[in-house]
Image (tube, rainbow, N blue to C red):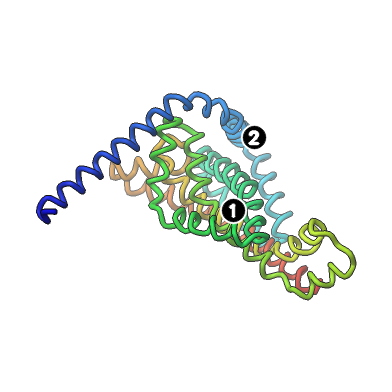
């Protein structure tokens, strides 16, 4: 074959392949887009409900509720007080509504990621074959540029909250899957043998031994999922997800330095609050796990 013609033929084949895949995906979105929108409508309703609850309730009650939740999880007066001060400052600077939208989005995405990722991580820990199949997918999900996740969801759902949630969950779910798998696999074999000696079934070992001992690792995965969700929420503002990401995007487009810095600092404040709270909870679990050994 002529070496000069080979690159041209390769480009033609690649162009034909791209057109075929793009056409097939467009046909899929036309055929199933409406059905998928109906399927995910409860998710949109849940997110809208949480947003309205946080935004339209009296701010003092919302602040008290958030502070109580942080105090209950972290058991730290310092973290709780620092979180209240940070949220008061955010409200004083006029970013309360956008902050509440962002918190609602991160909360829903994190819950979805944990609900989906935890069983997958457990399956990977129980089956080497499943681990061999899922691990390359996780590698791809973590190395794929985050903007790429926006393309298929926008083609299917258009602009709005649902495509944003789906893109955020896909981007943020790998840590909780990986660390659930890792935590269960690292449970001591001696502990499992002792459970078997007492006649524990496979399900009882998983429920009463492996998962409790793996909780610190699982919580580390949840912590990383929360951080990645918060990072992706800003990017998801490009497809209509309201929150602190939209003012940042507007600041970039219109070169508003102050607006970008203020909203960026608000995002940092939320990240620090969530990170310190989940880390404190993870350390408590670690202490309990070490005391039980």
User: Quadrant of the rendered structure where residue 38 is?
Assistant: top right
Residue at 90 percent of width and 67 percent of height: 198
Mark 2, residue position: 58
Locate residue 151, reporting x and y percent.
Answer: 38, 39
Secondary structure under badge 1?
helix
Question: Is the residue marked by circle 2 packed among few (<14), some (14-19), or many (20+) residues within 10 Å?
Answer: few
Q: Which mark is residue 85?
A: 1
Q: Is residue 264 visible?
A: yes
Which quarter of the rendered picture does the C terminus lie within? bottom right
Front-most of residues 241 and 35 = 35
Percent coordinates x, y for residue 3 in the rendering: 12, 56
Image: 209 above or below 115:
below
Query: Could you classify mark 1 by the number of other residues whose Cα lies within 10 Å: few (under 14), some (14-19), or many (20 or more)?
Result: few
Is the residue 147 above or below the residue 162 in the image?
A: below
Earlier in the chain: of badge 2 and badge 1, it is 2
Image x and y of residue 48, in percent: 58, 31
Residue at the spot 67% in from the left edge and 63% down from the top edge: 280
Q: Nearer the viewer, residue 282 or 78?
A: 282
**Residue farthest along the right direction in this orientation:** 198
Residue 81 can be seen in this image = no
Within the image, what quadrant is residue 25 found in? top left
Figure check: 127 above or below 96:
below
User: Horizontally, is 191 left or right of 238 in the view?
Assistant: right
Quarter of the image with the N terminus in it: bottom left
Per the image, label 2 sits on a secondary structure element best described as loop
Residue 266 left/right relative to 49 = left
Q: Residue at x 59, y 48 (%)?
A: 113
Q: Give the tally of numbered discs.
A: 2
The Cα atoms of the two marked residues, 2 and 1, are separated by 17 Å
């Amino acid at each position: 074959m002529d070496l000069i013609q080979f690159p041209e033929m390769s480009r033609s084949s690649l162009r034909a392949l791209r057109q075929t895949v793009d056409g097939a995906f467009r046909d899929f979105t036309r055929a199933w887009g409406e059905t998928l929108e109906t399927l995910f409508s409860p998710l949109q309703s849940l997110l809208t409900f949480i947003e309205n609850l946080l935004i339209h309730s009296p701010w003092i009650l919302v602040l008290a509720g958030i502070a109580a939740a942080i105090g209950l999880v972290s058991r730290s007066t310092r973290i709780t007080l620092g979180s209240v001060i940070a949220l008061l400052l955010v409200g004083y600077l006029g970013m309360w509504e956008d902050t509440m939208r962002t918190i609602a989005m991160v909360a829903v995405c994190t819950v979805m990621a944990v609900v989906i990722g935890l069983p997958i991580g457990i399956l990977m820990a129980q089956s080497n074959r499943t681990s061999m199949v899922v691990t390359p997918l996780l590698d791809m999900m973590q190395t794929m540029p985050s903007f790429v996740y926006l393309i298929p969801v926008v083609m299917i759902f258009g602009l709005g909250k649902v495509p944003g949630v789906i893109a955020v969950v896909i981007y943020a779910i790998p840590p909780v899957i990986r660390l659930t798998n890792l935590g269960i696999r690292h449970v001591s074999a001696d502990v499992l043998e002792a459970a078997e000696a007492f006649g524990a079934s496979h399900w009882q070992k998983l429920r009463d031994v492996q998962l409790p001992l793996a909780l610190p690792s699982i919580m580390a995965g949840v912590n990383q999922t929360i951080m990645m969700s918060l990072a992706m929420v800003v990017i998801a503002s490009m497809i209509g997800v309201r929150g602190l990401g939209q003012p940042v995007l507007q600041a970039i487009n219109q070169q508003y330095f102050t607006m970008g810095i203020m909203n960026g600092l608000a995002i940092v404040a939320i990240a620090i609050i969530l990170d310190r709270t989940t880390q404190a909870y993870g350390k408590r679990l670690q202490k309990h796990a070490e005391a039980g050994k």
